[in-house]
Amino acid sequence: MPKALKAESFEARARAKAAPGSHAPGPEDEGHGPRPLIIDSGRNPLAAGMRELWSHRELLFFLAWRDVKVRYKQTALGAAWAILQPFMTMVVFSLLFGRLAKVPSDGVPYPVFAYAGLLPWTFFSNTAGTGGNSLVNNASLITKVYFPRMVIPGAVVLAGLADFGLAALILFGMIAWYGLNPGLALLMLPALIVLLTVLAAAVAMWFAALNVHYRDVRHALPFILQLLLYLTPIIYPVSFVPARWRWVLRLNPLSGIIQGFRSALLGRPFDWDGLGISAALTAAILAYALWSFRRMEQGFADVI
Amino acid sequence: MRAIIRIEKLSKRYRIGSRGTARYETLRDTIVRGVRMPLRAARRMLDGSRTENQGVARHDDAKYIWALRDLSLEIMPGEVVGILGRNGAGKSTLLKVLSRITAPTSGRAELYGRVGSLLEVGTGFHPELTGRENIYLMGAILGMRRAEINRKFDEMLAFAGVERFVDTPIKFYSSGMFVRLAFAVAAHLETEILLVDEVLAVGDAAFQRKCLGKIGDVARHGRTVLFVSHNMASIEALCSSCILINGGELEAKGDPAQIVMRYMAAELSAHEGSRALIGHQGRTGISNPLMKSVSLLAGAGQTSGMVRMDEPLDVRVEFEAEAAIRPVLGVSVRTAEGMPLFGVNNRWTNDGIEDDPIRAGTITCSLGKLPLMPGMYFLDLFFGDFGDPTRDLDVVREAISFEVAPADIFGSGALTPASEGPLLWRASWSAQAGREGKQ
């Protein structure tokens, strides 16, 4: 039996070769043809890694879809939770800080001021929090199947964007309700969303990789995010902070982005310097996160 | 013809701690090491001595195990290669390295084609999602395109036999249905190279046959398969060649029947009555191998892994400790299936404890006449210091095996049936006639 099988399979192989294109091209196309897939102890170059990530984009969408789907399975309210979370926070903040503490809000009604900050913040903190635990939570996948590991935190970011989109609907409702007219400033919104997404992805990726090696991250992350909420102008406007301390806020890349969101949505003037600093910081964080993720990536399956 | 898989001197080293109890280091460990490392480097520079370096290397070696060591291999297109070897020989590590889950420590491999791997059944399944959703999800995880999954969807469902439950969340599936669905998706992977770990151990016999058939189909379509199994019959039936891995090294490659024979012979010679324990795979607990070797003394005192029923058996362990200790030895006996039968330990019995500590020597435990039925048994060894009752210094599971041979111990000429369990029991009988029965 084994000999017959061998002979037969060689023939079949020859036939398959004679009829090229019988196999559907797959996500590891670079392994085809004369260029072999090389496995050694070294790291593949960044460009190859990015190409591979791109070829696994379908997996990215499937994992994001799974996260969205599973998150609201067996919940009575379903996707309404995506709206409820920032909305209820906004209500509490409006009562507590807007009404009682009389925190100023740059001349726009406090609820819409708070919500315009909470919308990007909720996306960022959910993405960083869930993303930071994503590799560890998918340990069984990592030890049993190969795919570019960045897909896992990447899917979390994508799933977070779905919630972000839903929650944004409320914001547009509020803008209309308060009769605000952002005008042409709204054109900046897509760029701001990209910047926010890149920042969230970089932070999620870095924490996720670090978490594989040091489980301290799991405990530190919620705490860091809570502190960050207060170190970002969400509850209060930048003008609330004494001028000589404002540079501290600028060190936080989220401040520029969240301020930008308010400018784009509520028709307030842009702080271009702050936005520029945020963009530069985001780029630096992304570069560091990429480098660090790729450095740690190879050991994931061994230590997770 | 050119090889489709070319493996050159592939090695993979694992740190012992990282897969055992201390699974990951905490930030504190790293900080401590980060502070120490420059100090140590500075000291080494000042010393400039080679002995220091060698000391460090030896110290590090004890903390690592080589799951693969300089393994070289070429596999031709269309070959179906069975991989044989003991537990811990490196079979799964080889598949993990080839499927890029883990990177090799050194060496390289070239693969000329798409690689699909099936190392575990049901990886990536989510219990809350339906059968349909899971097929798409797992297909994507295994590297299939959406169009490819669409095309094969009905075929997969039919293979798994779960058509009626396609829109039921799989948390309501029976375990059999779950396994069938998972395998169905994986079995329809169309890669040039397929790596299959021992996944067929699950599922009922009929489904196993179906899966083996499917793997056979894959092979007949000219794809290359690497296939780990403990099922010798399926290896002989499916594979066109076979490799034997031992201690991370390639021991042999050749015709399946020949390699299977060789593997079985090696397994049997494992009960030769004495065994070195230094590099034993079953060691748990503290990493220092104190127990050097174990020998079994059967009957009249000769070293043998074969003991006749009702014959006495002594277990002698040779040890060498760093400091003088008062050695205690625990021995527990298990069946070949792993069921514990009994354990003895002179820590509990206070028997044969030396007053004067010794650093190296032997300790012997006489088990007496073994009340065991014919069959194969394993010994676990626990070695400790009487002065330290809190822990064992060295533990080796399945340290050595032995065979109990049938014997006519009752002088009746009748052999005991094998189906009566592992214990040999002595009983006595008496029959009395009742009043009615008297003649």
Image (cartoon, grey):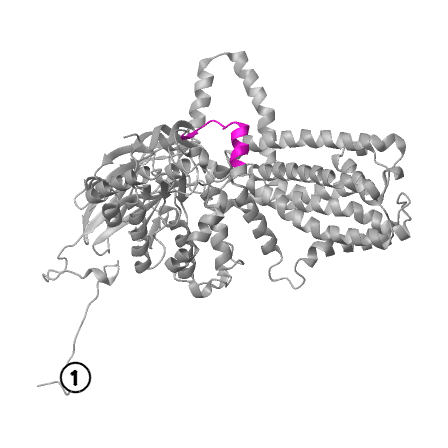
Foreground of the two, B90 or B423: B90
Residue type beneath disc 1: Gly
SS state under label 1: loop
For the record, the magenta segment spans: A36-53
Q: Quadrant of residue B263?
A: top left
Q: Which residue is mark 1?
A: B434
Q: Is residue B322 visible?
A: no
- Which residue reaches farthest front? A19
In this view, B276 is above or below B136:
above
Q: Position of residue B166 (x, y in %)?
A: 47, 62
Q: Is residue B78 left or right of residue B393?
A: left
Q: Residue at x 38, y 30 (%)?
A: B110
Q: How many marks?
A: 1
Residue B345 falls within the magenta-colored stretch: no
Task: Say whether residue A42 is magenta.
Answer: yes
Task: Residue lying at the far left in this picture: please name it.
Answer: B439
**Residue that appears at 65% across and 60% down:** A78
Foreground pick, A31 / B259: A31
Mark 1, chain letter? B
Q: Is B148 placed above or below B172 here?
A: above
Q: Residue furthest bottom?
A: B436
Crowding at dot 1, Cα within 10 Å, few <14 / some 14-19 / many 20+, comes out as few
Residue A10 in percent (x, y) is at 26, 39
